[in-house]
Image (tube, helix red, strand yellow):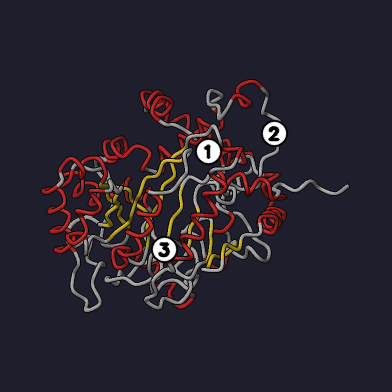
Amino acid sequence: MRRQPYLMANHVKQQLANLKQLTFEVTDACNLRCRYCGYGEFYDDYDKRENKMINKDAALQLIDYLTTLWNSAQNASAKRNVYISFYGGEPLLNMPFIEAIVNYVENLHCPHRSFTFSMTTNAILLDRYMDYLAAHQFNVLVSLDGNEYNTSYRVDNAGNPAFPRIIKNVDALQGKYPDYFEQHVNFNAVLHNRNSVEDIYRFITEKYNKIPSIGELNNMGIRPDKIELFQQSYRNSYESLHQSENYEAIEQDMFLKTGSYQNMGIFLQQHGGFTYRDYTDLLFDQSNTKHIPTGTCLPFGKKMFVTVNGKILPCERIGQQFALGSVSEAGVNLNLQAIADKYNAYYAKIEKQCGKCQNTKSCIQCIFNLNDLEGSPVCYGFMNKQAFEEYKAAQMDFLRKHPEDYYRIMEEVVVE
């Protein structure tokens, strides 16, 4: 008997019609040369960086393609917000593209969608464009790794430190637009061997009264000749946090920006018995529901990422060799059935392992981050019965030590 596939073309179309975020890689050029950059010397899973600018007409073709889906009959009663995001390289190096897209989106006939603009920036050009960003209420995520030493891997092409310019421009933005800064500006830091979770947290909370997001170095797509150098730079966020003398207070303040609370949120969502995605979850027994292997997002279930070369991916965090389609001035090339088939083929490689894993319901493993995906991938997050019981015991122990956080998670965390 032929096995029923996990995904079909209509599933992919449904995700596109309900897309939450569209992210453009505005340019692959950058005015900094951060040693650990995801497009830098450590990695080899991205297209060659050639200081290119994204094609505006191709981007408009994609927006028109998505607008047709957003205006389709199946979405006639659904009012949703879509984030239009700008990424790089350094996106402010291609401000004409950003202005063109913002103008186009603001004038779209799309009655069932509202739009929010966002950007990740190194802030080197923030002084030039802060008026525009504030006027259009951009959500801005500034990349800053802590104090001057913590941020010392962020240098320009001549090797000059970026920290003084970042701070000067961020301070200027805060001074000129304090309300906008309070509501729309946040910080993202990379954890490495010149900082710690506590360093980052202390600097940004004390200077700007913001809780930073902190990410580890990407451990996928590393060049074989750079593994040793990568390992010297890499720091684990959980270990770094717990080396702090006051780690519990920091962890509570950062809340879902730490691994402990993220794990707890997922655990309560999947195993608590009191969370429901929709009325179907509430009214019908879901205990025997067949789960899709791994915790991989459905294609375009969270976002769409468009590279400067027109490749279409489900996320900027995966290798560009996993493109699902492309866009050019000639139009959008997305074969929805081929995308479903690709995912089903990947699922088939891992489903036996997932079928024996005790943590299937709360898995967060992205299939695209498994080694040898095109061959015989192995999931290192696999849990047998003993490992899962230890995992459950750790979550319950966390709840016993932080009983107030159960209510905080259940009341404050919204799962879409």
Vertical arrangement, residue 74 with respect to residue 307, above or below:
above
Q: Amino acid at mark 2?
A: Thr
Q: CA distance from mark 3 to mark 2?
A: 37 Å
Question: Mark 3 belongs to which amino acid?
Answer: Glu
Kindly state the secondary structure of the residue where label 2 is placed.
loop
Q: Earlier in the sequence, mark 3 or mark 2?
A: 3
Give the amino acid type for the residue marked by disc 1 in the picture.
Tyr
Between tags 3 and 2, which lies in front? 3
Mark 3 = which residue? 25
Residue 391's disc is 1
Please name whichever residue, 203 or 198, is drawn nearer the observer in this view of the structure: 203
Residue mark closest to the camera, 1 vs 3: 3
Q: Earlier in the sequence, mark 1 or mark 3?
A: 3
Q: Position of residue 235 (x, y in %)?
A: 36, 58
What is the CA distance from the residue labelled 1 to the residue labelled 2?
22 Å
Compared to residue 9, the image places residue 158 above or below, namely below
Query: What residue sits 36% from the left and 23% below the top?
Result: 404
Give x and y (percent) for residue 209.
Answer: 19, 42
Corner quadrant of residue 363:
top right
Q: Secondary structure at mark 1?
A: helix
Q: On the picture, is 3 further left or further right than 243?
A: right
Residues marked 1 and 2 touching at CB (< 8 Å):
no
Asked if labels 2 and 3 touch by Cβ distance under 8 angstroms, the answer is no
How many marks overall? 3
Residue at 71% x, 48% y: name it: 8
Which badge, 1 or 2, is on the more N-terminal residue? Answer: 2
Quarter of image, res 359: top right
Q: Is 41 placed left or right of 173 in the picture?
A: right
Q: CA distance from mark 1 to mark 3?
A: 38 Å
Would you name the residue on which mark 2 appears? 289
